[in-house]
Amino acid sequence: MQILDGKFLAAQIKAEIKSEVDNIIAQGKRAPHLVAVLVGSDPASQTYVKSKAKHAESIGIRSSEFILDESTSQSDLMELIEKLNKDNSVDGYIVQLPLPKHLDESKIIEAVDPSKDVDGFHPVNLGLMVAGNSKAFIPATPFGIMEILKRYNIPTAGKKVAVIGRSLIVGTPISILMSRNTEPGNATVTMLHSKSTNVKEVCLDSDIIIAAIGKKNFVTADMVKEGAVIIDVGINRVDGKIYGDVDFEHVAPKCAAITPVPGGVGLLTITSLLQNTLKSYQLKQS
């Protein structure tokens, strides 16, 4: 059984980005610039935004933050987004989700300039991804999953893949990416969700399971066949501890390879955001 080590891969990818950023700066050009917008004081979001800033700065990417009050109005947030869209010194920015309930998430996402949408959530980027256009910004978590599969040489062509969860952030994009005529890709994908009635049967028949449902230890050992590959996207905080969507202790012995939680997909989500920021910068220069 192989542990798919997100920490190791994240360090490798960050070193690659740092090399490119160092080369940009050596030519006398400005560094790529990533901005995070955080509304409110959600502890998980605060931690994530700080982590993004730390990782960006460690490889020479400029990082800025806008921390807004929980009561910020829709119009004030839209005004800031418009400002960021027009600011030529900003290559990419994210509006940290979830937003407070009084804000319209869809309208906020749609207001982001697609060329700066390094989260890959804008409908234009999702459309470009579906079309297989190389200019698409792939949502960070699916991008990270594809990097894990690619860099660990996990065979995907012709394999049966179960994706548990259908969110626009993870489940739906990774289903599309895994079924495309690319490497990794070329898999036969089944998307499972809250209305699926045959989850266990599909999982038992799958070579690869990608769990992104947000339920602690949802995938149990009796749902996994011998030699399967497990990608656990879940980050569930229960009583101060972090659990994945997969019962790691009992599932891991059956697997050919598995991502741990923490230390797996989450770290690649941040590096994917940095890769998208560098890509946005490079597209502007070309």
Image: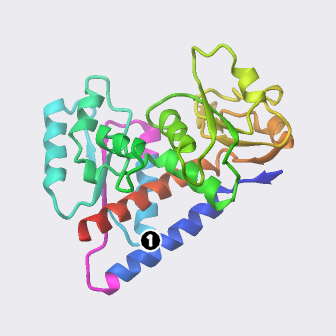
Is 160 rendered above or below residue 257?
above
**SS at mark 1 in the image:** loop
Name the quadrant containing residue 178: top right
Residue drawn at point x = 26 percent, y = 75 percent: 30
Residue type at tag 1: Ile
Residue 181 visible in rendering:
yes
Residue 65 visible in rendering:
no
Query: Which of 129/165 is in front?
Result: 129
Tell me, yes or no, whether the highlighted magenta stretch contains residue 78.
no
Tell me, yes or no, whether the highlighted magenta stretch contains residue 45.
yes
In the image: residue 204, left or right of residue 129:
right
* Residue identifier under label 1: 59
Q: How did the renderer colour the structure?
A: rainbow
The stretch in magenta equals 25-47
Is 195 rendered above or below residue 58?
above
User: Measured from the top left, where is residue 9 in percent x and y?
Assistant: 61, 62
User: Measured from the top left, where is residue 180 in percent x and y?
Assistant: 53, 45
Pointer 1: residues within 10 angstroms few (<14), some, or many (20+)? some
In the image: residue 273, left or right of residue 89:
right
Is 91 rendered above or below residue 214?
below
Residue drawn at point x = 48 percent, y = 54 percent: 270
User: Measured from the top left, where is residue 207 in percent x and y?
Assistant: 74, 39
Q: How many marks?
A: 1
Name the quadrant containing residue 97: top left
User: Measured from the top left, where is residue 153 in percent x and y?
Assistant: 69, 59
The quarter of the picture where the C terminus appears is bottom left
Residue drawn at point x = 50 percent, y = 50 percent: 143
